[in-house]
Image: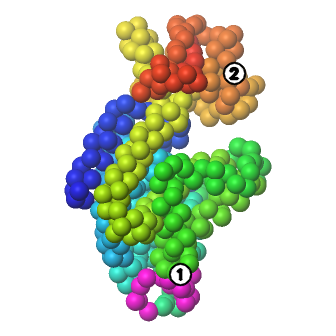
Amino acid sequence: MSVRVSLALAAAAGVALSVLSPDSYQQDAGHHYLAARWAWAHPETFVTVWNRPLFTLLYSFPAQLGYPAAKIFTLAISLATAHQTYRLAEAFRVERAWLVVPLIFLQPSFFMISADTMTEPLFALLFVIALRLHTAGRTVAGMLVASLLVTVRPEGFFLGVLWGAWVIGSTPGVETNAPRRPPASTVALLSTGALLWWLAALLITGDPLYIRRTWPGNWGLDATYGVGPIWIYLARLPEIAGLVLLVPFLAGLGRSLRRREFWTLTSPILVLFVVHTFLRVSGWFGSAGYARYFVCVSPAIAILTLVGWNAIAARLVPARPRFGMALGATTLAVSAIVTVFYASMAGFYGRDARAVADMHAWFREHPRHVARLIWSQAYMNVLFDHDPLTRPPMYADRAGNIKILEQSPAGTLVFWDDDIGQSWFQITADDIERAGYERLLSRSYLLDGWLREGQWLAKWVPRAQRMHLLYKR
């Protein structure tokens, strides 16, 4: 199979995923989309911390065409990441380089957000491009691209420090023939992205401390999302590398560590593993223990998986070539099945999209003037397409949220659900009704995955959800 065929199959799977899952498995994706869509109306949005400057800038263009277009833009980024990973595997002279395309898309966490509006795929693309430049000896260009990582995700800071160690120090296994650079110029080059971010914030807002002032409130030391065990990411390795592909990944990682090779692949994975484990154990900086964080280094995971795959094949194929080929084909097939099931079953909010769309369709048939929209799920506002900044900030403050509802003007429409509405904002539809709102519609839903798992998996329970539309006259 050629790399082009692999990319074509991945593209078809990504398009199908975007259709079957019109929203995301997490709320972050919808919020990122809304920020990008309305950034030109609120230029300061381009430089806030949580919205990620480079992500918001790039997505602000396809977002003008709507949510599906933004999701397909992510798919294009994911395909470009796979292709660049293939080119990097070629540069490392890894056999069967074309296999990295299925090996990256068959990472369950990667596939699940490969047609979403999360920030990790863009980070992965910049990461692999920077690695290719570094490996080719173009260390200055590599550092400039690597400096942009911090404008996409916080992991960029830690990988920037690691990158500096590669360039300044005598790091074993760093595959480049470029001469080392002095510390001062290295730090300056790796700080370019952060400096551009600060300068853009200054020009747009006039506030030299704007980045500090917009630091997310839940990125502190108060364990907003709780804490997790030290083995949290060991337990999530099947979600990161793949349930079946975990074997060749660990084989490739172990081989690379023993032979002190491919250090530019192994060290980023290990750095993120240590950093995210510490953050999850401590609960600092809003760490929630998600497997998707490792999509940031998915190109490195794919190539190391291929290294392990080749090592296993070298033992099996010469003696039993037919068995080796059958085992390889079975591994890919089973991995594809596992990955599809993971995408279908991993998140509840993707299923909620069907209920949200149904409620939105009802409102279009029974329209009212909407002066303000208050919503509990981002996809609700994605469909209504209202300026998200007209919605007052709401937090886990019951009294404060009820006060916002009471003070909202006539013509305020509240689109609420029984899950996030209660768990995130501490108020129910009954509370909203008591705050002076007329209940237009409430509907209950039983939401299965798009594979209809509830019909044939005995222990699989479809998601029970209830949606509400309330209006203030």
Q: Amino acid at mark 1?
A: Arg
Q: Is residue 238 magenta?
A: no
Q: Is residue 43 above or below residue 34?
A: below
Q: Residue at x 39, y 15 (%)?
A: 361
Indicate the position of residue 23 as horizontal and vertical percent values: 44, 33
Crowd tier of the residue under label 1, counting other residues whose Cα lies within 10 Å: few below 14, some 14–19, many 20 or above: few
Judge from the rendering whether residue 415 lies leftward or rightward of residue 278; answer left or right. left
By secondary structure, the bulk of the magenta-drawn segment is best described as loop
| Sequence-wise first label, 2 or 1 | 1
Q: Residue at x 65, y 63 (%)?
A: 275
Q: Residue at x 50, y 33 (%)?
A: 345
Q: Between residue 87 and residue 117, name the one nearer to us.
A: 87
Among the 4 quarters of the image, the one containing residue 124: bottom left
Figure quadrant of the N terminus? bottom left
Among the 4 quarters of the image, the one containing residue 178: bottom left
Q: Between residue 393 and residue 14, name the one nearer to us.
A: 14
Among the 4 quarters of the image, the one containing residue 367: top left
Gap between marks 2 and 1 measured at Cα? 55 Å
Range of residues picked out in magenta: 163-179
Q: Is residue 381 above or below residue 455?
A: below
Which residue position holds label 1? 260
Indicate the position of residue 172 as horizontal and vertical percent values: 54, 85
Q: Which mark is residue 427?
A: 2
